[in-house]
Image (cartoon, helix red, strand yellow):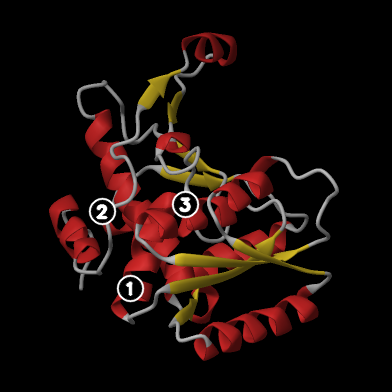
């Protein structure tokens, strides 16, 4: 396929991948007048904290693809291994619950004496939670949970076992870019001066890069990395684009 392609063609390609409907879309695009005045540039914020499902967040978009694949495999139980404070764990549990699936979270870290924040929401939503001290113990706990649920007559699905775990974010945020471009129409935005920033490094940023390059836009994309190593962030974006 040669590029650039039209927005409709890109949307058609994305929609060809199975997904379920979870996110509240389109999420609002809000002007930041005071910050814009302070910095001397026009700033708008895409409110992906308002995607719904247990306080929302960017992972809800990804889960539309991840859980579609899981359900197509006949799964009734989702197993996910992340860190103890994970936003992804909260949103995955909420999405799975909405779809009638059970959730098993293998969380890296020690259970705190006082359960608060995301962990509290995980419990409220009904997740089975197993704590692991490190990545080795976490990997072992995932296999033990899979075997245990299979023996009990269930069909577990480990989200991270599939390439879709990473691909879903690129698909979701290519789609979100199309959504954003639709919202920008009529706002007197020069695409040559448009600069998109995203803090979902490694998985979400490739979606913006994919959309901008596929559409042949002059728009610049910058990731704000929540990582210690700049090289690690760049490598993840490059390998997932």
Q: Is residue 235 left or right of residue 240?
A: right
Q: How many marks?
A: 3
Estimate the x, y position of residue 54 in percent, counting from the top left: 49, 42
Residue at 78%, 81% in the rendered image: 136
- Front label number (2 vs 1): 1
User: Which of 138 and 223 lies nearest the eye of the viewer?
Assistant: 138
Disc with the residue nearer the chain's start (2 vs 1):
1
Q: Is residue 204 visible?
A: no
Indicate which disc residue 94 carries.
3
Image: 159 above or below 200: below
Give how far apart the Cα atoms at labels 1 and 3 are.
Answer: 15 Å
Image: 192 above or below 187: below
Indicate which disc residue 133 carries.
none
User: Which of 194 and 102 lies nearest the eye of the viewer?
Assistant: 102
Residue at 72%, 84% in the rendered image: 140
**Which quadrant does the N terminus fall into?**
bottom left
């Amino acid at each position: 396929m040669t590029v650039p392609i039209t927005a409709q063609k890109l949307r058609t390609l994305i929609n060809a991948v199975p997904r379920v409907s979870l996110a509240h879309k389109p999420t609002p695009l809000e002007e930041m007048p005071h910050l814009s005045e302070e910095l001397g540039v026009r700033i708008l914020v895409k409110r992906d904290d308002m995607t719904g499902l247990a306080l929302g967040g960017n992972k809800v978009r990804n889960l539309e693809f991840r859980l579609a694949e899981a359900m197509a495999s006949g799964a009734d139980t989702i197993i996910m291994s992340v860190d103890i404070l994970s936003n992804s764990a909260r949103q995955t549990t909420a999405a799975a619950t909405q779809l009638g699936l059970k959730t098993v979270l293998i969380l890296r870290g020690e259970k705190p004496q006082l359960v608060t924040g995301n962990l509290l929401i995980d419990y409220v939503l009904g997740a089975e939670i197993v704590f692991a001290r490190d990545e080795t113990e976490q990997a072992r706990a995932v296999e033990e949970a899979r075997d245990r649920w299979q023996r009990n007559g269930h069909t577990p699905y480990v989200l991270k076992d599939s390439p879709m775990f990473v691909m879903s974010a690129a698909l979701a945020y290519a789609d979100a870019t199309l959504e954003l471009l639709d919202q920008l129409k009529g706002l007197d935005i020069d695409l040559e001066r448009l600069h998109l920033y995203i803090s979902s490094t490694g998985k979400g940023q490739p979606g913006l890069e994919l959309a901008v390059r596929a559409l042949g836009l002059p728009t610049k994309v910058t990731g704000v990395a929540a990582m210690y190593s700049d090289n690690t962030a760049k490598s993840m974006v490059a390998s997932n684009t």
